[in-house]
Image (spheres, rainbow, N blue to C red):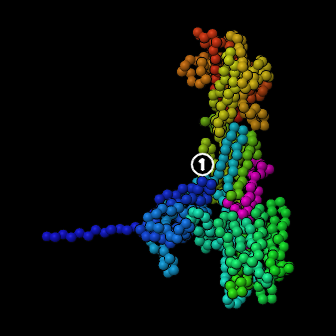
Amino acid sequence: MIISRAEAIVIINEPTITSVTPDTDHPGERVDLIFTAGAVTYDDVRMKLYLASSGNLVRGKDVCEPVTSATFVSGQSYTCIVHNLRPNTGYIASLQGFVAANLNANSDGLTTSSANFTFQTGSSFNLECGGDFYTIDFLYDDVISHNPQVRIAEAFTYSGNDTEHFDAQNGVQSIYAGNTPNFVIDQDEVIVFRGFPASISIDSNDSHITNIVSTYDFHVTDWHHGDNTTYQLNVTDFSGQRITGILGEVNAEGELTGLQFISVDDNGNVYDTGCIGPAENCTTFNVTQLLDDEYMVTISGEFNRNTSSFLALSFGWVSLDLHDYALSGNSSCVLNKTINWQLIEDSSFGITVSPPSECGSVRSIDDVTKQINYTNNIDLSDDNSTSAPIAGVGISIVRPQGGINVRCTYNTSGVVDSNFSVIGEDEQYVRGTNEIPFQLRFYADSGYTTPYAVGTLLNVLMSDRFYFAAEFKYNNPEHLGGMVIYAPECYATQGSSPDKSSGYLYMEKNGCKMQNDPVFQRDHALRAEHNNTLDPLSYTAFGWQGQTSSVVYVHCIVTACLNILDSNCVAPS
């Protein structure tokens, strides 16, 4: 008996996603998607995006076209950048490979869809909680909606034959050209605004304008309309400016003979290019903004290739309201904004609040952990922000619908150290991103009016009384806002470490001096005089047995409380 067996060999044609990672500079808005081409070579790869939370299709098919080579070669790995995402959001991506034949036949694709790949965008906000400040900043395109409505305003029209139509008002804003391929967003789904023109060049012959070249900082190549022949080149630089009006001249043959641009900068200065081209004046049409915050972004129209002349023009306008944002606790605390009109995605907003109790920050204390929290809010309700939790290191920020809630948490207890000996005293203090900064300091007198400077050598004779105090590093009423300090435990060690394993001596414990040790003192009257922002202590100098001279290190456990009535900061009398 002869048994035959047939084995099916499966050839994978579809692209395979291997990784998706948030972009370093814009982690909340874009990711790098790496995929491997299948058993065939693609002319382009197309992506569909779904929300991971609902499974709903939100975008697709976005196109990734090769840049450095003509095709995506089978078996090779490639990176395509995905733009216009929302921060801290889960997505599902699916890819298909295409060849030119599929595109010409309007086919659904050469390959079947790839396996779904789930990924998460990153955080959009930076928050630093310092000892006496907090700073928050974020980038424009990571937080604020940048998908505006585009208004098309016609300058002059032509109805006839033998013309070439060019349409720029959508494509130029969504093409991400560069050395790395990018997924280009379908214009029917969303128009991605990325910036206003950086410059516009006007070429002409003796009778009419022959070329209009627009350049954008986000686009590697120029957006060119015309006959590609240079006669006289007139380049206008619009860096830091926005175009508010366009004037033009058209001759009797319906040809464009002059263009004139009016622009404005952030300081309100108005610039006028004058009429560029063969025409002496630009008076046939005048297209201007309809709103104070609307500016020209693209040019489109009709071009006659036979006569190398423009027979129709229209302009795309974008209304962009980058109004001021303030902390909700105090509307006068306005965020600083740095706007890059030519590359809007790099515009930023930020503010530093110092001390953290300023700008209407709400202060509270956790009954369990005894940590002090400062909270505030930035209202973004006009910007269609979506709800998303955003995590930081040692802090937490939550951005609910319409705003960013900021919270800095500070530990209210810690160990502060100093030392005395024949060698001297060196000021030390504990300070962390999320800790109230304390310090333990020596004083030259019983009134605690003359602190020893850092690095001062302090010689103390045996049995002499020395004075030291636990205090806030930033000891001013504006910063403290009623906070008080208390050192319920102080002890001495032979080494600089607060670890007691190598020998130690308690000076006080639980706010009381040790039994049969009359030398420890707390100046209650002076403490009250300083509103409990200073805990003045003293002890008599001593040495370690068997040592003629030694270094003695003093350590205190320190606690901060919101007010003088908190029982955790009341010293026993």
Q: Quadrant of residue 344?
A: bottom right
Looking at numbered disc 1 in the image, what kind of residue is underneath it? Ala
Q: Is residue 337 left or right of residue 399?
A: right
| Numbered disc total | 1
Residue ID at (77%, 72%): 234
- Segment colored magenta: 316-345
Q: Is residue 526 visible?
A: no
Q: Which residue corresponds to the image point at 73% horizontal and 26% vertical from the top-left? A: 454
Q: Using the image as rendered, state which of residue 477 and residue 442 is in the foreground.
A: 442
Q: 280 above or below 529?
A: below
Instruction: Give the quarter of the figure containing the C terminus.
Output: top right
Q: Does any portion of residue 158 appear in the rendered image? A: yes
What residue is drawn where x is 46% and y is 63%?
A: 76
Find out whether residue 229 is within the magenta segment: no
Q: Residue 538 appears at what percent x and percent y? A: 71, 17
Q: Tag 1, which secondary structure? A: strand
Please name whichever residue, 136 or 389, is drawn nearer the observer in this view of the structure. 136
Residue 327 sits inside the magenta stretch: yes
Give x and y (percent) for residue 498. 59, 24
Give the percent coordinates (x, y) of residue 37: 46, 65
* Residue 271 left/right relative to 80: right
Task: Residue at 63%, 68% (x, y): give it.
Answer: 174
Q: Nearer the viewer, residue 549 or 58?
A: 549
Residue for badge 1: 391
Residue 253: x %, y % from top left? 78, 89
Q: Residue furthest front?
A: 231
